[in-house]
Image (tube, rainbow, N blue to C red):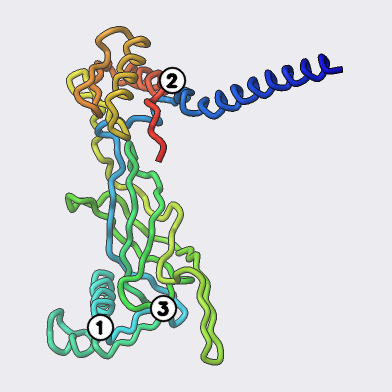
Amino acid sequence: MGTVSFRFSALAGRIGRTLAFVALACAALPAATPAHAERLKDLVQIQGVRDNPLIGYGLVVGLDGTGDQTTQTPFTTQTLANMLANLGISINNQAAGSSNQQSSLSNIQLKNVAAVMVTAVLPPFARPGEQIDITVSSLGNAKSLRGGTLLLTPLKGADGQVYALGQGNLAVGGAGASANGSKVQVNTLAAGRIAGGAIVERAVPTSVSQAGTMQLDLNEMDYDTTQRVVAAVNNAFGGGTATALDGRTIQLRAPSDPEQQVAFMAQLQNLDVKPAQQPRR
């Protein structure tokens, strides 16, 4: 009986030591496991291919009494007067810039009009005729833009050129109600979006390849990841195709023919690269 107990205790001890070893190995496994492979397009950006911000100033009309208080925002009435003048309608038939015109403008009370700033992002390779989303935000003291319509608004880039024209009905994500002196509001009512509310009028020249070369920029600077990307590209397309310029920039030899360049980029962005493992934070 004593021999059986001794053997059972020895077996239990070995099982316990084995389980402890397995537990330690499992605890160390996440730190030792290499990073999983990612597509190259998720790790880098092509230099020269980027979005371009656009901005414009316009008017929103058709509000239900929630527009600007024009006594505090005189630029709203001035903008409206200028717009009407361009349409051949003059206010009180006064000459532009006269003191009588200024006094007549100050007497105008427009509860259903609001001055707004319009912003948008022009994606790379956008062509005239394409539609892009725009965001409309109140510039004055309008209470709400719900139900409003943005009038034709030119959207300019940083160079002052018009790249798109915006217009349409706003979709406001906020909601509010008031009664008996109480008021409740969810999100903001002074900003809204128009899906496909702007039409591109001018394309931004995008140069991907110059003199048969292009550059890739890593999303995060890392010498190890840069070296891995260079190795993956050279293994796929031949030695000397990729060269690391620094810890973030990689220069590529690319085809000069546009059709071959598209095929080259399609294969390039789908390469699998194992990025360097980032330390835990």
User: Left or right of 222: which side holds 197?
Assistant: right
Residues packed near mark 1 inside 10 Å, few (<14), some (14 to 19) or many (20 plus): some
How far apart are the alpha carbons under marks 1 and 3?
A: 26 Å
Residue, disc 1: 91
Residue, disc 3: 143
Query: For the point 34% across and 53% down, which residue is it?
Result: 120
Q: Nearer the viewer, residue 30 or 40?
A: 30
Q: Which structural element holds mark 2?
A: strand
Query: For the point 52% across and 76% down, which residue is it?
Result: 176
Q: Earlier in the sequence, mark 2 or mark 3?
A: 3
How far apart are the alpha carbons under marks 2 and 1?
A: 66 Å
Q: Amino acid at mark 1?
A: Ile
Rendered view: 268 above or below 205: above
Which image quarter is the N terminus in? top right
Residues packed near mark 3 inside 10 Å, few (<14), some (14 to 19) or many (20 plus): some
Residue 272, numbered label? 2
Residue 15 position by quadrant: top right
Q: Amino acid at mark 2?
A: Asp
Q: Earlier in the sequence, mark 1 or mark 3?
A: 1
Q: Which structural element holds mark 3?
A: loop
Query: For the point 36% across and 66% down, which residue is it?
Result: 137
How far apart are the alpha carbons under marks 2 and 3?
A: 52 Å
